[in-house]
Amino acid sequence: MSKNMKCWSVAILLVPLLSVPAYAAGDPAVGATVFNKCKACHAAGPGATNRVGPVLNDVVGRVAGTFAGYSYSDALKAAGAAGLVWTPDVLAKWLAKPKDLVPATKMSFPGLTDQADIDNVMAYLISMSPNYKPADGAATPAASSSSAAQ
Ligand code: HEC
């Protein structure tokens, strides 16, 4: 009996750790260098303007296809109208392979193959999104304590 109890408590302790999203470990400063790959088409930061792609300030938490003044593909506008929001989980899929998420997007970037690049650029995009409030519990205390290397 007591052995069982012990197993259960180990399992209960592990669940929150396992559910911590990988991007919680990302480093925004490293992500800023990964963002160099995006800069061919995107700008972020003060005074950023739309280029080949839309401005990425405040992109985390934004409805897809809605940055003012940018001419999105019909596919991304439709995805946004259908409820696609750039939460970190959704963004992680997009960054790995945009066309898996929205097949007819005009973002002609194949995706980031290195999970660490995705985690770091995600942390950077979150840092550029001051209005983003993780309502889904993504930034749990467990997440912040496990990413103490800030
Ligand atoms: C070759 C140009 C190009 C590169 C490189 C590129 N993007 Fe894009 N991106 C686009 C275009 C074009 C769109 C608009 C897509 C559409 O309308 O279907 C877009 C859209 C996006 C969106 C959706 C924004 C919104 O307002 O809905 C995000 C997020 C995004 N890109 C992130 C990135 C990140 C992060 C990188 C670097 C890892 C990157 N992109 C690299 C061209 C690019």
Image (cartoon, helix red, strand yellow):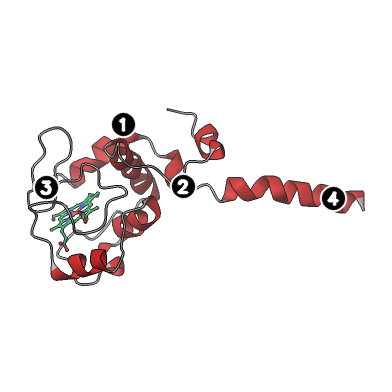
Asked if marks 2 and 1 touch (Cβ < 8 Å), the reply is no
Name the secondary structure under disc 3. loop
Q: Which residue is mark 3?
A: 40
- Which numbered mark, 4 or 2, is in the foreground of this view? 4
User: Which amino acid is tagged 3?
Assistant: Ala
Local secondary structure at mark 2? helix
Q: Are marks 1 and 4 in contact (CB under 8 Å)?
A: no
Residue 127 vertical placement versus 52 (above, below): above
* Gap between marks 2 and 1 measured at Cα: 16 Å
Which residue: 13% across, 66% down? 73
Residue at the image point whose x is 10% and y is 34% from the top? 47
Label 4 sits on residue: 5
**Is label 3's Cβ within 8 Å of ligand 1?**
yes
Q: 10 Å neighbourhood of mark 1: few (<14), some, or many (≥20)? A: some
**Which quarter of the figure has residue 91?**
bottom left
Q: Earlier in the sequence, mark 1 or mark 4?
A: 4
Q: Position of residue 119 (x, y in %)?
A: 38, 45
Residue type at the position of mark 1: Ala
User: Mark 2 Cα within 10 Å, few/some/many (few <14, many 20+)?
Assistant: some
Q: What is the secondary structure assignment of the residue under circle 4?
A: helix
Alpha-carbon span between mark 1 and mark 4: 43 Å
Q: Are marks 3 and 1 in contact (CB under 8 Å)?
A: no
Direction from residue 130 to residue 48 in the image, left or right? left
Q: Quadrant of residue 17?
A: top right
Which residue does the numbered mark 2 point to in the structure image?
22
Find numbered disc 1 in the image and state the secondary structure of the residue it sits on: helix
Three-letter amino acid code at the position of disc 2: Ala
Image check: 93 left or right of 39? Answer: right
Q: From the image, tell me which residue sits under label 1.
A: 29
Indicate if the residue with disc 2 has its beta carbon within 8 Å of ligand 1.
no
Frontmost of labels 1 and 4 is 4
